[in-house]
Amino acid sequence: MLSFGQRLAAAPAVIALCAVSLVGAALPAAATTQTELSRADVTSKIDFRLNRLNNLNTSTAKSSDLTIGQKEGLQLMIADAIANLGELRLSVATSATVDEIEADRRTMTGYRINQVVVPKGTFVIRGMRMAHRMSAAAANIRAARSRTNSAADIQLTRAAAQLDVVASKAVGAATAAYRVAPRSAVDGVTPFGSANTYWAAALTALAKARGYLDAAQKADRKAPSDTVIRPAEAKPGTPLFDAP
């Protein structure tokens, strides 16, 4: 059993191995047999998943918003997925029949890379980023209160409180997503229901905060506006299929 450090260190090598075509598995330009067509199809789908995992691995490594535990947990999950797909790619290259290749396809689907692994990492990264940015925005708003216009200050106080709620709900969304097991998806059913609920609550609080900031602006044009909130953070929907 490899240690966390060994598995993590092995990931770049596996990524590099799977990022190029295997010479022994190169297909003739005129190959039209069902076996070769199936092999090419499954291999391309594996490479697509490896590319997504590679991008997620880069985003995870660069993130300054994750806790140490979150970062290590995501990196280990990604390293496992990359290693599994690397082994599967080799199996596809040597499978001799359509049935064997289709068995490889079912194995690939069972890893739930697109349905769970990548969305999970994206949700955690974006949730924690949202939390930290909204907490910073709340602090900036509190520091900007002029105390010369009570009407504006009341609205700013309300806005800051709502941004605290956004941050709390965003952490809740990230935590719920982090708890999702890689293979927990069932076709047609998302395992991110709890995370989605937290995220929806975060967006609701964010909309309220923007409303209070607009009211503060009407009371005092010098009051902070909703530009203190990055427009991207007000994007509706969930981070499941966005870039991390």
Image (tube, rainbow, N blue to C red):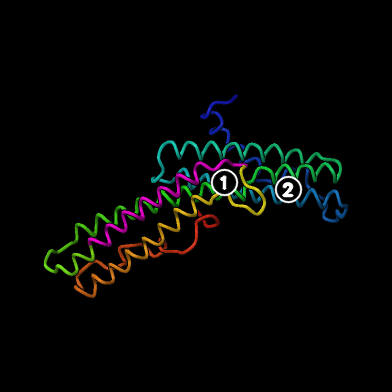
Amino acid beneath label 1: Asn
Read off the residue under disc 1.
54
| Magenta stretch: includes residue 174 | yes
Determine the residue positioned at 80% across, 46% down: 102
Report the Cα–Cα distance between label 2 and label 1. Answer: 16 Å
Crowdedness near tag 1: few (<14), some (14–19) or many (≥20) residues, C-alpha within 10 Å: many
Q: Splitting the image into 4 quarters, where does residue 133 fall? A: bottom left
Left or right relative to 44: residue 139: left
The front one of 195 and 35 is 195
> What residue type is disc 2 on?
Thr
Kindly indicate whether the residue at mark 1 contacts the one at mark 2 (C-beta within 8 angstroms).
no
| Residue pictured at 24% horizontal, 57% vertical | 140
Location of the N terminus (image quadrant): top right
- Give the labeled residue for mark 2: 43
The residue closer to the viewer here, 9 or 162, is 162
Q: Give the range drawn in magenta.
A: 157-183
